[in-house]
Amino acid sequence: MFSIEILDLSELSDAASVLLGKIGDKRIIAFYGKMGAGKTTMIKEICRQLNVEDVVSSPTFTLINEYHCKNGKSVFHFDFYRINKIEEAYDLGYEEYFYSGNLCFIEWPEKVESLLPDNTLMVRIEETNNSKRTVTVG
């Protein structure tokens, strides 16, 4: 487990780069944090560094967005904030995405925690003093 301190947005790119370097062979990345902590902002920067060609935005109402990278691979971005029952994740067909071999970034994973594969990488983003962020990975 390790932590990254982000003092302001100018450090986001470096933090995302470090996080990408730690992903290894993990395909499911779960982003925990309160509303406004920076989960979507971090995912946008990671996608930029992965050369995603699409506009990256939170899939709050659609639950999932698929982004295409220049290398032809897909990245899936989930936002489970609005689900009320785990059955909604089953209805979405989560298994097809989670076990596709593509990267899956998940916001509000606590709503579907029992469905997350054992090798999920947990990322916690906490806002500390003066809008600083601590990103804990492990």
Image (cartoon, rainbow, N blue to C red):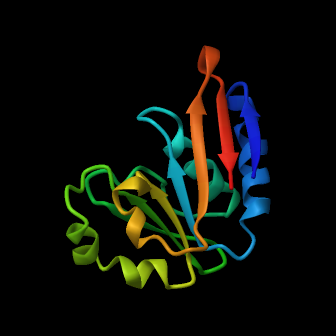
Q: Position of residue 58 (x, y in %)?
A: 40, 50
Is residue 33 or residue 38 the one in the foreground? 33
Q: Where is residue 15 in the image (x, y as percent from the top left)?
A: 75, 44
At x 58%, y 33%, the residue is: 126
Is residue 84 shown left or right of residue 78?
left
At x 47%, y 77%, the residue is: 98
In this view, 78 is above or below 44: below
What is the quadrant of residue 51 in the picture?
bottom right
Is residue 132 shown left or right of residue 116?
right
**Residue, far top:** 130
At x 68%, y 51%, the residue is: 137
Quadrant where the C terminus sits is bottom right
At x 47%, y 59%, the residue is: 106
In this view, 74 is above or below 30: below
Is residue 67 shown left or right of residue 119?
left
Q: How many marks?
A: 0
Q: Position of residue 94 (x, y in %)?
A: 36, 76
What is the quadrant of residue 24 in the picture?
bottom right
Q: Where is residue 27 in the image (x, y as percent from the top left)?
A: 60, 73
In this view, 47 is above or below 73: above
Is residue 91 or residue 53 the one in the foreground? 91
